[in-house]
Image: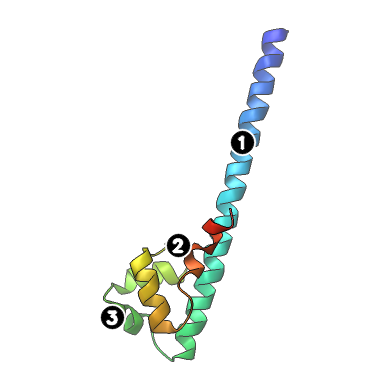
Amino acid sequence: MGAAKSRLLFLYKVVDERSQMLYAVHMKRRYYHKIAGDIYQKRLEKGMSAGAVASALGISKAHYSYIESGQRRPSPTLAKKIGDYLGFDHMKFFEEEKNK
């Protein structure tokens, strides 16, 4: 019985750690989707297409679309370019990491 109980406790711990990790990933994705919404709004305010912004930034439309939809996070250099071009604080991409 001792080995079975020990194994059960081990499994509970693994499940708990996994659920905490999945929650952290979920929160990070939620945060990126919020930033993506901000980027999208800024682009619409400028009356530009995603392709036009991507071209101005020197990246592919697909890459820009991944960033704008929250599926990818830009490099610090690209984040600064996006922020400068669209007129918002590029550090928003990295605030979530600072708050940990």
Residue farthest to the left, as pictured: 58
Which tag, 2 or 1, sits closer to the chain's start?
1
Considering only vertical position in the picture, is 49 above or below 94? below
Colour scheme of the picture = rainbow
Binning the other alpha carbons within 10 Å of mark 1 as few (below 14), some (14 to 19) or many (20 upward) gives few
Which amino acid type is marked by label 1? Glu
Q: Marks 2 and 1, how far apart in space?
A: 24 Å
Q: Residue reaching furthest front? A: 98
Q: Amino acid at mark 3?
A: Ser
Location of mark 2 (residue)? 71
Residue at disc 2, secondary structure: loop
Eyeballing the image, is 88 above or below 2? below
Identify which residue is drawn at 52% across, 56% down.
97
Q: Against 21, is 54 above or below?
A: below
Judged by depth in the image, the label closer to the viewer, 2 or 1, is 1
Indicate the position of residue 59 as horizontal and vertical percent values: 28, 73
Q: Which residue is mark 1?
A: 17
* Amino acid type of the residue tagged 2 in the rendering: Gln
Q: Residue at x 50, y 71 (%)?
A: 36
* Distance Cα–Cα, label 3 vs label 1: 43 Å
Q: Position of residue 2 (x, y in %)?
A: 71, 8
The crowd level at tag 3 (other Cα within 10 Å; few <14, some 14-19, many 20+) is few
Report x, y in % for residue 81: 35, 76
Q: Is residue 21 left or right of residue 67?
A: right
Disc on the earlier residue, 3 or 2 = 3
Which residue is denoted by mark 3 in the rendering?
55
Q: Nearer the viewer, residue 95 or 32?
A: 95
